[in-house]
């Protein structure tokens, strides 16, 4: 398959980690090496002879290193097709053929993540390196391009396997990887400049990809694009599935509301919380979260905002769950939970959420700001004669945090910082409320003195009437209906407290 021997190489990299064995192998194979600056010095310190690029171009590195390889004698050697006409021109202009180019770009993405210094960021926009990658990738029929440190080991294995020869399939695979690197790099630079732009733009490139066992169902293929390990350390369990990822995302979003403060525990099923409680200890939080719906908890996703201790682990270990997420685990708790090899244990590094969310639809993508707004008691406006008590306000804040993370239409019933009933994904808010009441009663909760949160306004007083008859004493909702007063009047006539936030939290 069009085998070619590597006779010459240009190496110009940022990261030297893993480069030494490649340079040594190339030297062993008799490959002539050209290099620049720090890379040249590094290879020479390995005891390997290197030809400086400036000896080829007759130009030194200039402009503080901004221009080193940008020269016809470099790019001619990379872009020349190995056919008579092009080879004649190389000979005419004394341009060496370059069969291999190894590049690792300036770390632009990492620099943006770690500093706000604009000058430092701009200097990490690689020009020569990205051009070398594109040139080598374009001429893959004759040239091998190693576009980043991620490919160092892959290329070293190829050198050892084929003794310095490559075939067309090898070169095309590296070309594919080169354009993956260059496209990702350009998108990150574009997004940096677009941050303050008023013009809507959509350019995303997630460099890492993990092929999943399957998608939402076994007959669907699935791939995760993103860096899972940047967010989690996987301590135990089987491979993360598509549905696990969706549920884990929902769990992190919910627990971000309770990240700071007393121990909190949530149980999720199919992205919806079926149990949640805030307590003085993590064990109490777990027990009361499970009590919210011990049936739906089977095979669910569990998440805590605090360290899992042994006592809590012993209780958790009694049920079947898919994934458990926590900031940390005591050693004895981890040892116990790890005995069940199929249970996935994740250590979450932070609860930070992205500023944007995306969804594919209609052969396109919609983008919006993430719903990061969380109302406090100060944001609640009392609209009824009866004022909510301090205990009711605390529960209303708790319920309102949760209601934004359940599928619309949704109702949350809470009491003493515990989810006692919820209805979600209903086409009618009345149905959502009835579902919540039925679930609460099924699991033995006394709704007398409980509170209710709604993700959107009440167009009629039917929901507050049903709530009142169930024993609910305080309600929070966004308001905004032209018939808001009907619900307010009912509350006034029946001694209910109602608060309005002015903020709707639909979640489709």
Image (cartoon, rainbow, N blue to C red):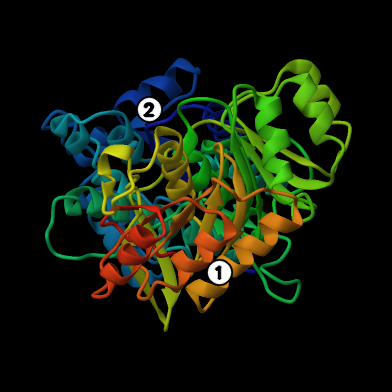
Task: In this rendered view, identify the residue nearer to me: 53 or 484.
Answer: 484
Foreground pick, 81 / 497: 497
Mark 2 and mark 1: Cα distance apart in space = 65 Å
Apparent side of residue 362 relative to residue 437 in the rendered image (left or right): left
Looking at the rendering, which quadrant does residue 358 occupy? bottom left
- Which residue does the image show at 43% across and 30% down from the upper left? 15
Q: Name the residue rendered at 44%, 46% in the picture.
A: 401
- Which of discs 2 and 1 lies nearer the camera? The answer is 1
Q: Earlier in the sequence, mark 2 or mark 1?
A: 2
Q: Residue 39 shows which numbered tag?
A: 2
**What percent of the width, then of the height, locates residue 304?**
61, 34
Mark carried by residue 246:
none
Mark 1 surroundings within 10 Å by alpha-carbon count, few (fewer than 14), some (14 through 19), many (20 or more) = many
Residue 39 in the figure: left or right of residue 241? left
Q: Total label count?
A: 2
* Residue positioned 84% across, 35% down in the render: 317
Q: Which residue is mark 1?
A: 432
Instruction: Kindly indicate the quadrant of the structure image that contains residue 352.
Output: top left
**Position of residue 267 measured from the top left corner of the image (x, y, whole percent):** 66, 46
Residue sitting nearer the eye, 275 or 181: 275
């Amino acid at each position: 398959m069009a085998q070619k021997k590597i006779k010459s190489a240009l190496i110009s990299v940022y990261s030297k980690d893993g480069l030494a064995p490649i340079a040594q192998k190339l030297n062993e194979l008799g490959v002539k090496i050209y290099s620049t600056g720090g890379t040249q010095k590094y290879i020479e310190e390995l005891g390997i002879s290197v030809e400086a690029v400036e000896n080829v171009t007759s130009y030194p590195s200039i402009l503080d290193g901004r221009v080193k390889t940008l020269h016809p004698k470099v790019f001619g050697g990379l872009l020349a097709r190995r056919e008579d006409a092009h080879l004649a021109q190389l000979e005419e202009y004394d341009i060496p053929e370059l069969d291999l180019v190894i590049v690792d770009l300036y770390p632009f993405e990492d620099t943006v993540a770690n500093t706000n210094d604009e000058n430092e960021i701009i200097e990490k926009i690689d020009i020569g390196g990205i051009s070398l990658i594109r040139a080598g990738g374009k001429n893959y029929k004759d040239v091998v391009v190693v576009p980043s440190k991620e490919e160092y080991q892959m290329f070293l294995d190829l050198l050892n396997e084929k003794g310095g020869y490559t075939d067309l399939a090898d070169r095309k695979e590296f070309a594919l990887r080169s354009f993956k690197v260059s496209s990702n790099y350009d998108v990150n630079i574009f997004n940096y400049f677009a941050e303050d732009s008023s013009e809507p733009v959509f350019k995303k490139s997630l460099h890492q990809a993990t092929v999943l066992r399957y998608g939402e169902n076994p007959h669907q293929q699935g791939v995760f694009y993103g860096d899972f390990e940047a967010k989690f350390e996987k301590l135990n369990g089987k491979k993360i599935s598509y549905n696990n990822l969706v549920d884990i995302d929902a769990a992190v979003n919910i627990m971000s509301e309770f990240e700071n403060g007393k121990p909190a525990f949530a149980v999720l099923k199919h992205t919806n919380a079926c149990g949640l409680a805030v307590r003085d200890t993590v064990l109490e939080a777990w027990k009361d979260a499970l009590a919210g719906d011990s049936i739906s908890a089977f095979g669910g996703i569990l998440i805590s905002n605090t360290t899992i201790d042994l006592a809590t682990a012993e209780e958790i270990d009694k049920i079947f769950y898919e994934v458990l997420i926590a900031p940390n685990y005591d050693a004895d708790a981890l040892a116990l939970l790890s005995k069940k090899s199929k249970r996935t244990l994740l250590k979450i590094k932070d609860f930070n959420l992205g500023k944007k969310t995306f969804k594919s639809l209609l052969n396109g993508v919609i983008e919006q700001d993430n719903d990061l707004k969380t109302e406090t008691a100060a944001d609640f406006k009392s609209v009824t004669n009866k004022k909510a008590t301090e205990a009711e306000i605390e529960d209303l804040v708790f319920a309102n945090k949760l209601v934004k993370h359940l599928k619309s239409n949704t109702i949350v019933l809470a009491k003493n910082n515990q989810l006692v009933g919820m209805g979600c994904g209903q086409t009618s808010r009345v149905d959502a409320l009835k579902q919540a009441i039925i679930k609460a009663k099924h699991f033995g909760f006394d709704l007398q003195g409980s509170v209710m949160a709604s993700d959107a306004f009440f167009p009629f007083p039917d929901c507050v009437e049903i709530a009142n008859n169930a024993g609910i004493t305080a309600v929070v909702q966004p308001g905004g209906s032209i018939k808001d007063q009907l619900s307010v009047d009912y509350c006034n006539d029946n001694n209910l407290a109602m608060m309005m936030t002015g903020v709707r939290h639909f979640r489709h």
